[in-house]
Amino acid sequence: VATKAALSAVKKLHQKKYRDDAGLFLVEGRKSVEEAVKSNAPIQSVFVHSGIIALIPFLGALKNKNVPVYEVSSKELESISDTETSQGIIATVSYQDHTALEKSLLQKKELLVVCLEDISDPGNLGTMIRTCDWFGVDAVVLSKNTVDLYNSKVVRSTMGSLFHIPVLQDVDLPVFIRTAQKNKCSVYSAELSHSVDFRSVKAEKKSLLLIGSEAHGISKGLSALADYHIRIPGFGNAESLNAAVASGILISYFKQQA
Amino acid sequence: VATKAALSAVKKLHQKKYRDDAGLFLVEGRKSVEEAVKSNAPIQSVFVHSGIIALIPFLGALKNKNVPVYEVSSKELESISDTETSQGIIATVSYQDHTALEKSLLQKKELLVVCLEDISDPGNLGTMIRTCDWFGVDAVVLSKNTVDLYNSKVVRSTMGSLFHIPVLQDVDLPVFIRTAQKNKCSVYSAELSHSVDFRSVKAEKKSLLLIGSEAHGISKGLSALADYHIRIPGFGNAESLNAAVASGILISYFKQQA
């Protein structure tokens, strides 16, 4: 049984401050928790509604790994859940530690890394991570002002992709880009002006793609560091493309070239 | 001044039943209303917060066209607004009438039409329409079970693109597809299985792209009608691509070929 103190600690994980303190984030919904289990994510505890406990086959595997599984009431679940229509299951999972990867990543011989600058919309960030997963991007790198990766809306909208590919958070992008260039990566910045049609550039074996938010694009500082400035040509009257859609088009092109 | 009866009538437009009865939908937010004005959309009335009325230059143009502009209080605005953070302006706009276009569209010599089957997520539908606008698609055609085009979340997420390109609603897709084929259109259905890499097919001068929802894909009935079945190859572990992202990748490819 989950104690009040345990539930209260879980509830606090909806706030970044407490997540950072505990090094834990929440994964809500059956599909997302299942992806975490399949991906051997470091699950610390699971809270599941008593009504569906018998219907979830992967709980057995968790218990075998000594992960505590707590049966909770509707009211208890509601008190710790962020989503209006909770699907009856929430897990706490340890932050991913990518320190080792951060060092080895840029040494790979072939590489496609996507750097996201200051994306503020959680759903968009989640969709972008999912798109990177689909195309087998080697890593996603987030600038310091990007929305928190462990925000529950981001986690939900990655639909498990957060557990499939490495996502580096809170990265000093100018430093990362310079290091990448020293390691023979070519840097492509997606920008609407002073840029060329993306299909006119060749993707190098080691490529780094910079994508900014739809509202602000890539900052001048980052843009100045890029080797290529590319855009997706528009034919109609829309002012901009959704950032996740733009990412998909560019990543698809880079993967096709590789 | 807006009467209580007028405000009550506007509020009802959040429900499809009343929208259909009145042939009117709501456009909220300064940017979206501005796009409607620029695009000469048939605006019937505008409700604007007294605090910002002096800050909106395009209101003069509306008054010159004899469109009634009502000054409303915060409370009145809240009562008719759907969005939590209303931007202080709401317009009622007549439904678009595409009857004439529906007849002439398929007679064009070059053509890219995007047919969407049963998209249920309003934000996704809006983003897809915006993507079609970006690429200058000739028309977007929606199946009968697609979320209502005039749903306020759809309207908002099109970011004005609804006023830039024709969107045909409530269309019997099997009939539309057969008619298109009689008019020498090639039909490409986006499907994950029994399909080929999209880059292995050539876009014909008259092309029709079928895209389904992420959850259900294209129905068997529609799939059977298609001339080509295409997919976006995946390299990672994600189960699917977001439908708007997938649309963007395919439309970009078809436009590049044309």
Image: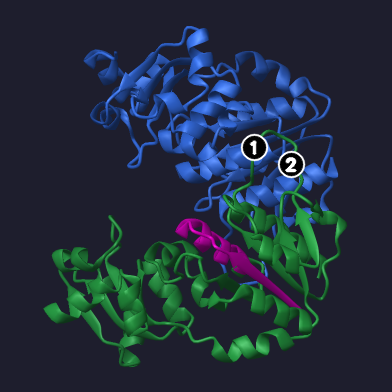
Chain colours: A green, B blue
Question: Where A244 falls versus B56 (above or below)?
Answer: below
Q: Quarter holding the N terminus of chain B?
A: top left
Front one among B200 and A121? A121
Question: Where A250 falls versus A133 (above or below)?
Answer: above
Front one among A18 and A39? A18
Q: Describe residue A28's horizontal placement relative to residue A109 as left or right.
A: left
Front one among A142 and A236? A142
Place of residue B73 in the rendered image (x, y in percent of width and height, measured from the top left): 27, 26
Is residue A100 covered in magenta?
A: no
Give the residue at x 54% y 33%: B143
Give the residue at x 56% y 16%: B97
Q: Describe residue B66's horizontal placement relative to residue B99 as left or right.
A: left
Give the residue at x 82% y 46%: B256
Image quadrant assignment for residue A45: bottom left
Place of residue B24 in the rendered image (x, y in percent of width and height, measured from the top left): 42, 18
Is residue A120 covered in magenta?
A: yes
Using the rendered image of the protein, determine whether residue A57 is visible from the camera's viewpoint: no
For the magenta stretch, what is the residue range? A110-132
Question: Where B257 falls versus A216 (above or below)?
Answer: above
